[in-house]
Amino acid sequence: MKLDIKALGDLLIGDAQADRVVPPTGFTAWLTLFSAGAMAFLAVFALALSLATGRLAERWGDELARTATVRISAPEAQMAAQTAAALRVLETTTGVARARALDDAEQAALLEPWFGPDLPIDQLPVPRLIEVIETADGVDAEGLRLRLQAEVPGAVLDDHTRWRAPLVRAADRLRLLGWLSLLLIGGATAAMITLAANAALAANAQVIQVLRLVGARDSYIARAFVRRFTLRALGGAAIGMALGCLAILALPSADAAGGFLTGLGFQGWHWLWPPLVPVLAALVAFFATRAAARKTLEEMP
C-alpha cells in the first residue's frame, strides 16, 4: 500500500467530525497503547542486542585475527635456548609486528581463573608462551609452522583460528536473532493493532451505517480509524521507547572484564536508532489499520 501525500496530510491534520466515529477511550484504545508501548520497549532491547553483538563480532574478529601464540614445550635445561630461537625466527618472519615471551607472573595470571592464585608455576612443567602481534597483512601461518618445526622442535603455533571462528559465528547468529526479533515484534504489533481496529469497527457498526446513510464514503470513515490508531500507536511506542532507553542506561557500563554482558547498549551514533522505533510503529499501525478498515467496511452490508 502507498502512503501518499493526501493520506499523510489527513493523518496530521485530522477531521473533527470523522474523529467522532472512533471512541477516544475504551478497550481498543488501551489495547493499542499497551501493545505499542510493550513492543517498542522490547524492540529497544532487540535493537541493543543486535548492535552490541555486531560490535562484539567485530572486536573478537579484529583482536584475535591480529594475534597468535607460540607454545614451547621443552625440558627445563633447553627452555631458554628454544625460547630465544623461537623469538629469532619470529623477528625475521614477514607479517610479525612484535613478539615477546610471557614471564612467570603473566602466565600465572592466565592460569589463575582455573587453578587459583597460589599455583606454584615455577615447580610445574608449564610451557613457555610467546605472544605474537601481527601486522595488518598477517602471517603465513603454515610457512611459520614449518620454520618453527625445523628450527625449534618444541614450538607449536596457535593462530587462534579454532577460537576465533566459533566466537565470531556465535556473535553473528546473535545479531541475526536480534534482527529477527525486531521483525517478529513488528508482526505482533501489526496483529494486535489489527485486532483492536476490527473490534472498534465492529463496536461502531451502527454508527458507520448511519454515516453511510448521510453520504459518508468508506474512505472517509477508514481515514478516521487510521488516524486515531496511528496516533495511539505512535504515543504508546514513544513511551515504550523512552522506558526502554532508561532501562538500557541503567545497565552496567561496558568494560573489558564484563565483555558482552556489560556492553549491551548503544554507543555513539547508535543512539539515533531508538527514536525510529515509534516512527516505525506508527507506520505499522497505519498500514495495518487501513487494511483492516477497508476489508471490514467492504464486508459490512
Image (cartoon, helix red, strand yellow):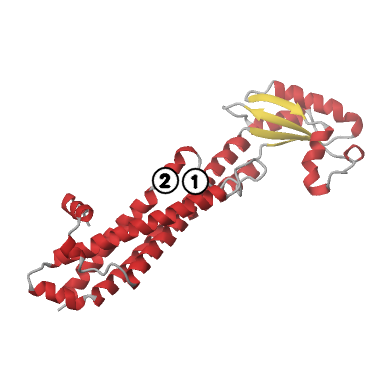
User: The residue tagged with tag 1: helix, strand or loop?
Assistant: helix
Considering depth in this image, is 96 or 293 the residue closer to the camera?
A: 293
Residue at the spot of label 2: 273
Describe residue 152's horizontal placement relative to residue 255 as left or right.
right
Q: Nearer the viewer, residue 140 or 95?
A: 95
Quadrant position of the C terminus in the picture? bottom left
Residue 224 lies left or right of residue 186; in this view the side is: left
Label 1 vs label 2: CA separation? Answer: 10 Å
Q: Find out whether the residues at labels 1 and 2 contact each other: C-beta distance under 8 Å.
A: yes
Picture residue at 77% right of the left edge, 40% below the top: 110
Image quadrant of residue 202? Answer: bottom left
Answer few, some or many: residues within 10 Å of disc 2's Cα (few below 14, many 20 plus, some between 14 and 19). Answer: few
Q: Nearer the viewer, mark 1 or mark 2?
A: 2
Q: Which residue is found at the position 18% from the left and 72% from the top?
A: 297
Please state, as top left, top right, bottom left or bottom right, where the N terminus lies in the image.
Answer: bottom left
Q: Quadrant of residue 225?
A: bottom left
Residue kind at label 1, given as amino acid type: Leu
Query: In the shown orientation, is residue 289 left or right of residue 165?
Result: left
Residue 300: x %, y % from top left:
17, 77
How many residues crowd around disc 1 within 10 Å: few (fewer than 14), some, or many (20 or more)? Answer: many
Q: Residue at x 12, y 75 (%)?
A: 210
Q: Give the residue at mark 1.
A: 51
Q: Relative to 132, does residue 267 appear above or below in the rendering? A: below
Q: Position of residue 286 (x, y in %)?
A: 27, 59
Identified at 30% across, 55% down, the residue is 283
Residue 218 can be seen, yes or no: yes
In the rendered structure, the answer to whether residue 249 lies left or right of residue 280 reads right
Q: Looking at the picture, does residue 48 appear above or below residue 67? A: below
